[in-house]
Image: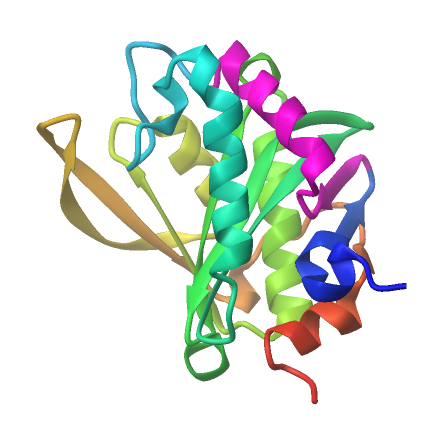
């Protein structure tokens, strides 16, 4: 039987490492993700994201969340794709971990990004989920580099990157809420990744690899 995961294997992808599980965002997860975001993702006086999606009115968040993930599915192609996976920790939904890339078959590089429900901050979950996605991208998809970035006044995100083994890779100045802000660029190579303490188990890998052109 043809399913949504048959048409788009990203939806059937599941990466597990100890208490951490990264799962393709199916429609049944859109509501719970929106509810988690409504509870809060960061201090209301601080904006860590390039696009200030996290401060949308609560009434708009479910639609915005659905449109983002539906758009990601609609625009998925060999030339450009993204995977923003739902993150579970000890079986509880805690946030989302993403990786996006362009021309991956040629460049073998892409960018990580994530968000974590504020109630789960400070427990090492953000570091764990980043280590898991990086290990997956390096070990199972053959990436040669992974980039990330965070504003210079976001020590929590920068700390996660350092714990994972990223190194600084220059800076950029961005328009953040109509004010200039310094963005710290970061890069990670396979040999520098600080591995998570648990090994990865991946479901749906052959189908996903074929969907991004890695296997015939």
Residue 107 image-quadrant placement: bottom left
x%, y% of residue 44? Answer: 34, 10
Residue at image location 79% in from the left, 55% down from the top: 200
State the residue in front, 88 or 210: 210
x%, y% of residue 189? Answer: 48, 66
In the image, which residues are magenta? 19-41
Residue at image location 60% in from the left, 67% down from the top: 138
Residue at image location 40% in from the left, 23% down from the top: 54
Q: How many labels does the image show?
A: 0
Vertical placement of residue 1 versus 26, above or below:
below
Residue at image location 59% in from the left, 18% down from the top: 36
Q: Is residue 183 magenta?
A: no
Residue 138 seen in render: yes
Residue 167 image-quadrant placement: bottom left
Residue 13 seen in render: no
Vertical placement of residue 130 versus 38, above or below:
below
x%, y% of residue 198? Answer: 79, 47
The quarter in which the C terminus is drawn is: bottom right
The quarter in which the N terminus is drawn is: bottom right
State the residue in front, 120 or 101: 101
């Amino acid at each position: 039987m043809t399913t949504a995961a048959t048409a788009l294997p990203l939806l059937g992808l599941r990466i597990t490492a100890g208490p951490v599980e990264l799962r393709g965002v199916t429609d049944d997860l859109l509501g719970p993700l929106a509810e988690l975001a409504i509870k809060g993702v960061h201090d209301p006086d601080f904006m860590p994201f390039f696009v200030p999606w996290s401060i949308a009115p609560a009434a708009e968040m479910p639609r915005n969340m659905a449109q983002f993930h539906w758009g990601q599915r609609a625009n998925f192609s060999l030339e450009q794709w993204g995977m923003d996976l739902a993150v579970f920790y000890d079986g509880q939904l805690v946030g989302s971990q993403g990786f996006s890339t362009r021309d991956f078959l040629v460049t073998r590089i892409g960018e990580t990004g994530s968000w974590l429900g504020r109630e789960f901050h400070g427990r090492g979950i953000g570091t764990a989920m980043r280590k898991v996605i990086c290990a997956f991208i390096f070990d199972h998809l053959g990436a040669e580099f992974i980039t990330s970035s965070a504003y210079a006044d976001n020590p929590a995100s920068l700390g996660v990157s350092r714990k994972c083994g990223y190194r600084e890779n220059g800076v950029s100045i961005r328009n953040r809420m109509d004010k200039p802000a310094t963005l710290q660029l970061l890069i990670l190579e396979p040999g520098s990744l600080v591995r998570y303490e648990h090994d990865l188990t991946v479901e749906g890998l052959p189908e996903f690899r074929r969907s991004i052109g890695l296997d015939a």
